[in-house]
Image: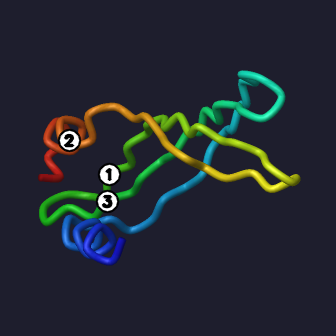
Amino acid sequence: MTRGYARYRAIGTREMRLGAVRLSALDDLHCVAHVAWTAVYAREEGPDIAIEFEVHYFVQTLAGEPKVFGWVSGDEEALLREHGIV
């Protein structure tokens, strides 16, 4: 986690904004949380840029406690390249 946070800071990540959250039940104990995010990056040249994306989190609830056990997202590196972040 520490290396991941360091990389995000190094590429200019300024903030992560949580957007809409939508739940899709799979069964009584599992769901997928579809979460919209907006990441704001500082660029060396030009104004900050905001990139919207979605991550799908797999959640299991046991003893009343939800826990994320996996997630699926798009090609983060391609999206960052497309916007000139990396």
Q: Do the residues labelled 3 and 1 touch (CB within 8 Å)?
A: yes
Question: Label 2's element?
Answer: loop
Which residue is at 78% across, 35% downward?
29
- In the drawing, does residue 72 fall left or right of residue 34? left
Residue at which label 2 appears: 83
Q: Where is residue 53 in the image (x, y as percent from the top left)?
A: 43, 37
**In terms of secondary structure, where does tag 1 sit?**
strand
Q: Earlier in the sequence, mark 2 or mark 3?
A: 3
Name the residue rendered at 26%, 34% in the picture. 75
Q: Distance between the residues labelled 1 and 2?
A: 8 Å
Figure coloring = rainbow
Q: Is residue 68 left or right of residue 1?
A: right
- Measured from the top left, where is residue 83 in percent x and y? 20, 41
Query: Which is more toward the observer, 78 or 44?
Result: 78
Number of the label disc, if any, that sits on residue 72: none
x then y, percent, for residue 17: 55, 55
Count residues near mark 1 (Cα–Cα under 10 Å), then give few for <14, some for 14-19, many for 20+: some
Q: Disc 1 marks which residue?
A: 49
Q: Name the residue under label 3.
A: 41
Q: Which residue lies furthest to the right in this view?
A: 64
Q: Are marks 1 and 2 in contact (CB under 8 Å)?
A: yes
Question: Type of residue at label 3?
Answer: Tyr
